[in-house]
Amino acid sequence: MSYIGKPKVAHPKMPKNDLGLTARDYEGTVSTLCAGCGHDSVTAAIVQAVFELNIEPHMLAKMSGIGCSSKTPAYFVSGAHGFNSVHGRMPSVTTGANAANRSLMYIGVSGDGDSLSIGAGQFVHAIRRNLNMCYIIENNGVYGLTKGQFSASADIGSKPKKGEPNQQEPIDPVSTALSLGATYIARSFSGDKEQLVPLIQGALLHEGFSLVDVISPCVTFNDHEGSTKSYAHTRQFYHHVVDADFVPPAEEIKAAYAKGSAMPVELHDGSKIVLRKVDEQYDPTSRASAFKYLRERFNAGEITTGLLYMDESRQEMHDLMGNTRTPMCQLPLESLNPGAGELKKILNRYR
Amino acid sequence: MATVNDVVVKIATVNGTGSASANGLLMKSIFRMGIPVVGKNYFPSNIQGLPTWYEIRVTGDGYQSRSDRVDIMVAMNAQTYARDLADVSSGGWLLYDSTWPRHKQLDRDDVTVLGVPLSRMCNENFDGARARILMKNIAYVGVVAALLDIDLDIITTLLEETFADKKHLVDSNMKAIRLGYDYARENFVCPLACKVEAMDGTSGHIVIDGNTAAGLGCMYAGATVGAWYPITPSTSLMDAFRSFCSRYRTDPKTGERTYCIIQAEDELAAIGMVLGAAWNGARSFTPTSGPGISLMSEFIGFAYYAEIPAVIFNVQRTGPSTGMPTRTQQSDILSCAYASHGDTRHVLLFPKDPKECFEMAQSAFDYAERLQTPVIVMSDLDIGMNDWMVPDFEFDENVVRDRGKVLSAEQLEEMEKFYRYMDVDGDGIPYRTLPGVHPKGSYFTRGSGHTRHGAYTEDSAAYQDVVDRLLVKWETARQTLPEAEFEVSRFNKAGLLTIGSGDGACVEARDRLAAQKINLDYCRVRAFPFSDAVKEFIDQHEVVYVVEQNRDAQLRSLLLLDAGVDPAKLVPLLHYNGMPLNAGFVVDRVLEEVARGRAA
């Protein structure tokens, strides 16, 4: 369907956000992915999340690497700036972009090949710096564009369409991020928009590195029986542990949450994330117990989802360095050198 | 061989024993006497315990390259004693620590050996093993000062400046220097026939290395984002940038920084960060060396095609592979000119010394932003890490730096629609926008095939339209970049052509050859793509000797590829053993060619 231009007409009664924009205004070009691809659902969730957050499109930077997932920034928020970089290198480009302009909002879309194989090094180090960005992994366990090779997130025993089942340990982005000290870690499923949208919203507003690992089935190469990343498998073993509601600033928390299970966490801009624990035992503020829980459920074959870990206390990259609040790219050049007189003084040290 | 202000002192020590400061002190004191000096450090890829040499060439004539002789060898390393003795030019002197006996077989009739019991004197006068080793190295400064007639007051002043807050260190260092100085005066005829005499040859000059100069240049250029992965010999460039920024870019009240230095996980990430920052409008750069360029190549091609400014400093070292990391070469010329897969080509600048490192560090950002493409500043270990005497740097506060074609919010507001890759002005350079400036400025940056409107394409004509326009931009670059330096007489049939750190040796070689009635014109290329004048220079001569520091005549190949000159005219003069080029090599090679019947 990709040869058809996308209609830009919005129904007059379509709801508008605070900027007077409709959800249509947050869409992109027509997707060229396969019909039924999980990634298109993630794209739709991103559109809704950004629309609801009243983000000015041109203040959003969409970053990606190479792969099916990395194509998707073209399919949402046409009014945002996009940077489709090289394979596995989205984190470094985003790091530099953020270093230059901390006033933009950064959303990076990556895949399991892009982040866990070729780009594993950059993924890991972006977390370590607590780079302020929302990092989405559209995780389907296979390489789509090169026709179905296993990725590093494929589970042991998962069967490919052709050939032998995978025997290597999978790399789990969530437990990897947890061990590295990421400050916002969520997992969801492309088929569960209700859970996914608030998780993306919290990730966008969290100051620091936010990971949203989304199981996003590949209908063409990894949706068959025996695959552990298929729609059917994910639905069957999908385990909500903590759900999150996003509450914008100045809005009261009205919903009634059972005491003890609901936990509002304030974000830096004054908005809140309310964590609703589905499993009473789960503690999303403890790395150690979250890790233990995740491993136990993983061993039981379950896919734990929700806002799994959050730490609002750690400083993001710029603040860790003590950088000015003014975006570096907006500092006038002439203010950045001490002048000809001072140069003479500097040179005197070399006589 | 009685000379004044024309002497070469080579000091052989063990690295990690404090000899670097002793050697620096010696060189600086000669410079302070107003005498031009050249300092070259030959050091191992090691932290402590291996042989290292420092060569000080006192050159009243003000030449810039290393010499091909050694007049005085300070042999402080028993491990290399034999080869150090062999290195001394006939009629020269060798100074050694006579505390321990010397092997009798190690003697040369044509070299005067001067023994000074440095260890014994220091053991008697200082406490502690570390202090004794350090002071032994300082004590030879005293001996050399006596032998050459270096002003002790100047040495004292330098020590006082170095240890401004630690007077006890001035005293102990001076005590060691006095031990050596007095011993030499009592036991040898001082000064030697080769000596120094105060002159007025250094005013308006400084002694600085190229990496420090480039780091300073980056600060003056207004660079705000520096991303890097440590690699010899480029590391000290970022160290310098950091040190200048911590002094001048940190708010004294709030402590807030107006610079962001990121130590990347590898060079792939370092260049990615540079591109991300430049895409957002910051002046960003990365210093690296050959292996780093190899890793950065994919992104360099991306920046060429997506048209993102980037400034890369390649402080070249000896390749291939890991090669000799602490030795110099100019062997990344081709790999930088054509870094990355597909049809790519990149702007190169060739600084000849630290002064040009300072200047080109600034202009590189202008060219990168003007041309919206990567600019690689091709320094090398010799320029980057050695101390060079160069004229004072200048900075004109009235010069407005070129930020290139960046549309402002006002300009965008007035436009109907913005397209990223349109050649509006006919110079091959499109207009760009910065994220966050105006809603109309948004576009999608991609390394995949794109149209002049910035849209994804797999259409042959639309693809070719953009890559052909990049060639128009290449020709604009040719007209824009710094012109080569020429010295041309209409009588000469042959010319000498070089780049970068080859300049010093070539200038000196021309003088020496002229003394033998061999007159060569001169062209020092400063940028790639090559200007029309470089092509004309070659066309106008019967033969052009291309002097470069690599095995494969890479500069010569590049001239053939880019300037389309007659290959028969270009005679390669290749120096690639890892040591800095010297004039003697150029002279000998030219004489050989002339003897074979080549034009001169």
Image (cartoon, coloured by chain):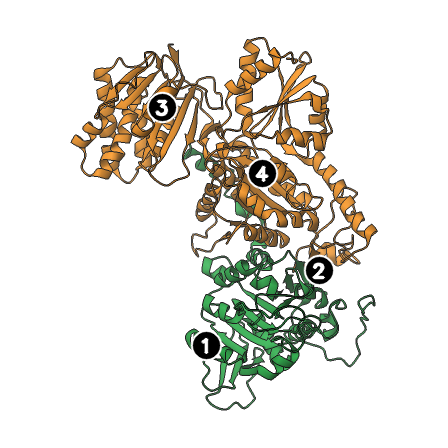
Chain colours: A green, B orange
Q: Quadrant of residue B55?
A: top left
Residue beneath disc 2: B442
Q: Is residue A156 visible?
A: yes
User: Are labels 2 and 1 assigned to the same chain?
Assistant: no
Q: Residues within 10 Å of mark 2 (few under 14, many from 20)?
A: many
Q: Which residue is mark 4?
A: B377
Residue identifier under label 1: A290
Do the residues at discs 2 and 3 belong to one chain? yes
> Looking at the rendered structure, which numbered label has been put on residue B565?
none
> Which dot, 2 or 1, sits closer to the camera?
1
Q: Quadrant of residue A59?
A: bottom right
**B581 sits to left or right of B474:** left
Q: Kindly report which numbered mark, 1 or 3, lies closer to the viewer in this rendering.
A: 3
Question: Which residue, as the protein is rendered here, is positioned at the far front?
Answer: A164
Q: Between label 2 and label 4, give the one nearer the viewer.
A: 4
Q: Amino acid at mark 2?
A: Ser
Whether marks 1 and 3 lie on the same chain: no
Q: In the rendering, at what x and y percent does residue B486 appear? A: 64, 22
Chain under disc 3:
B
Disc 2 is placed on an element classified as: loop
For disc 1, the chain is: A
| Chain identity of mark 2 | B
Gap in Å between the C-alphas at discs 2 and 1? Answer: 40 Å
The CA distance from mark 2 to mark 4 is 31 Å
Amino acid on which the number 3 mark rests in the picture: Asp
Secondary element under disc 4, as helix, strand or loop, is: strand
